Image (tube, coloured by chain):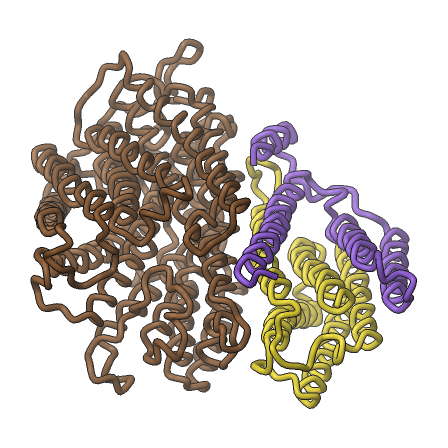
Chain colours: A brown, B purple, C yellow
Amino acid sequence: MKSWLTTTDHKRIGLLYFWTAFGFFLTGGLEALIIRAQLVRPDGGLGVSAETFNQLFTMHGTTMVFLALMPLSAAFFNYIIPLQIGARDVAFPRLNAFSYWVFLLGGLFLNASFIAGPLFGADRLSVAPDAGWFGYANLTSREYSPGPNVDFWLLGLQILGIASLAAGFNFIVTILNMRAPGMRMLRLPVFTWMTLVTQFLVITAFPVITVALVLLMFDRFFGTHFFLPSGGGDPILWQHLFWMFGHPEVYILILPAMGIVSEVLPTFSRKPLFGYTVVVYSGVLIAFLGWSVWSHHMFSTGLGPIADSVFAGTTMLIAIPTGVKIFNWIGTLWGGQIRFTTSMLFAIAFIAMFIIGGLSGVSHAAAPSDLQQTDTYYVVAHIHYVLFGGTILGLFAGMYYWWPKMTGRMLSEALGKWHFWLTLIGMNLAFFPMHLSGLLGMPRRIYTYSAELGVAGFNLASTIGAFIIGLATLIFFWNLLRTRSRPSNAPNDPWGGSTLEWAIPSPPPAYNFTVIPTVESRMPLWQTERHAPMAALPARPPAPIHVPGGSWWPMITALGLPVVAIGALSHLIPVVLAGAAVVIVGIYRWAYEPFEM
Amino acid sequence: MVEVVEEVMSAQGEGDKMATEQAHATTGTYLRVAAILVMITFIEVGVFYVPAFQNVLVPVLLVLSAVKFTLVVMFYMHLKFDNRFFTFLFGGPLLLGLAVVVSLLFIFYGTVRLRTGS
Amino acid sequence: MTHATSMGLDNRKMAFWAFIGSECLLFGSLISTYLVYKGRSLTGPYPHEILNIPFTSFSTFDLLMSSLAMVLALAAVQRGDMKQGKLWLLITALLGLVFLGGQFWEFSYFVHEGLGLTTNLFGSTFYVLTGTHGAHVTVGVIWLLTLWVQALRGKLGPANALTVEITGLYWHFVDVVWIVIFTVVYLIQ
């Protein structure tokens, strides 16, 4: 127990990230199922109140984006990146632990709002955030949202931002500076590359949301008018700041999944990735363009013809590097010796589903067409095709691919196939009809709709699809759990992968590599035209390897942050100060404790 | 962003030697830079008070401030002497931030004009 | 931390430059907010009625001098002259404190003149922007004093030059942010 609380081992932190994020994924999924059960038929299928419904869709979006998808990617960053680059750990192991604890506590803080009502004198149990995952002003103003709901949201996101930023700096340095000898930048596995690009997006985009949340906090706590027209402020500024962060954020969500797929497809096609360099540069270009499109979320605010055209143009431009990647993935499959493992099936489905999501995305890059689609279920369909069909399918591909490495145990392929097919059928049944109900005029975020709208059939289909996804996810959960009671059965390299993580035991020893390998090609474990596969590493380290011990201070420092937030939430200055004191003491003890790298 | 690869690859050549031994400026340089910084600050404040400059005040002040900014970053933060990758790590986000500020101002004032018709 | 890295650059220094890059976006967003709301206050006091240029010029001068003191401190620590190193570290911190004192005086004066945080958009954007900068200066002063105390206790030497260098990077960055704020907020009214 103590060893887990104080761990600075990237592999353990990766597992902690995985299980925590998977827990939040199930929570967010449960919220989605309640939403779908309510919408199963006109006039409400479950009797959920409008207030509860607002909380459900807000927490579903917030949870999935910040507490499930980002940290599930982070689980792989943590576990896999040091292995792929041939390092013994990340550059800053304690900072890494700090990121995890801040993420966990931020997530718990956010979800505590579901039961915190009585503490704030509310007449209901749940005071969960209820202004949507992008919290548009002036819904979030004290006037229209007097309870602590939005406070939970803004303080929770502020805490989570700290975790992401800390991890961002850590992984940039790790990837650039901790590579094994010979591991040049253009020999890095694509997953590592996409992680690097993602972290640059994190460290540039998160400061913007930090500022937006600070301004919102001032509006709510201290009576300023940053987003309130009554004092000359402009609610549109919130939208600009949010989407300046928000659009890079969706690439933060998708690029790691693209990286995973770029690892899985070559392995199970027994072919090098087609156009490696182009795939890498396309990822860089996507990230770069991702910064230039934010206003396409705001066409309906009336930006004027020039801004509309510019942002429509930049948005459509992104389709080019994305299309390039898709052709490269398909080119990788072409002529390969394809093995349809569960991981491979998810990766292929990723390509197909992401194309659908990408196409609907291009359809609202055009401003006139977007005006028809904005705030309808069409947008809901789009985001779910890219974030579920894209990110989640990619993450599932990664879970089947790397689970043996992370735990030493193979997942059941039979259960995996059930999981895959039910997920694929379920998601299309759930999300495809949303395009149609949206185009027919069903607005998003309504808790009931009338039978006259003519969308009852589509909604019924969506609900059935959602529950099929739920069933599939339970099968996956069972598949994960049953490996815990099974003997270790994973060899070093169960799939015949080409990258360094497959050169070491599953799960790897604490020090990862008995000897740091010298890398001579982009696919060190494969026979290529010019290079023989890397020689096997010695089974035992030839010399003793120093593994850094654990530390309490990352966790203790992290503990101070929710205390500060609780103090702010309840307007108790002493509590804020106490939390800040914990953080400061934690930082000093951390800085001056002996910690030999 | 594309430059990052080239930067990193060019840094590769420098290989294993730690770059702590780079040539730093001398105390004399530091003092000269400080003198220039103070002088520019005087000019800035002077320009501010001279009515003749009112028409070109904004561009002049922006240029002067950019010069000061660059001097501090180049000499006091040693970017002139240090590894070029640090320049990328700082300059990339800096330019991004600048681009975002400028485009936000354009969009924002553009739409305000649209909405108010003024 | 002496083992070789892939790029031959120190991990901490690289992380810190990335952090400074990130901070550019933080201050960029705050300055954007200030500029977007420029001239949109519904009531006074307005910037030209209240901003005190001579006083702020002095604060700017003070912060520039603190940057000079900081590079001198670093140069001294690097050549192992801890006596000079201690002196310049202390002077840097004290100049930082002078700046903070000036900001405290300025804020109190503005409040006295009727410009509170919530009075108008100018007040809100001004206090949040300069206050965030002031918070950065405060962190810097605490950091510098920590190093100074370490030096007094003989625990800071040429071996820790990199720590001093990183502290300096932070301090100079806070200085360049002020250079921008001085121009954008005070001089261009």
Instruction: Please say whether residue A530 is visible from this viewpoint.
Output: yes
Residue A207 horizontal side relative to residue A256, left or right: right
Q: Residue furthest bottom?
A: C112
Q: Quadrant of the N terminus of chain A?
A: bottom left
Look at 73% across and 72% down and name the residue there. Answer: C96
Look at 49% across and 77% down and name the residue there. Answer: A230
Please provide percent x and percent y for residue A275: 42, 20
Quarter of the image where one finds residue A444:
bottom left
Please provide percent x and percent y for residue B114: 55, 57
Look at 21% across and 33% down and name the residue there. Answer: A346
Quarter of the image where one finds residue A571:
bottom left
The answer to whether residue A161 is above or below residue B94 is: below
Look at 64% across and 46% down and name the residue there. Answer: B95
Residue A437 horizontal side relative to residue C148, left or right: left
The answer to whether residue A30 is above or below residue A502 is: below
Nearest the viewer among B59 and A584 is B59
Nearest the viewer among A361 and A520 is A361
Q: Residue furthest front?
A: B117
Quarter of the image where one finds residue A266:
top left
Please provide percent x and percent y for residue A406: 26, 41
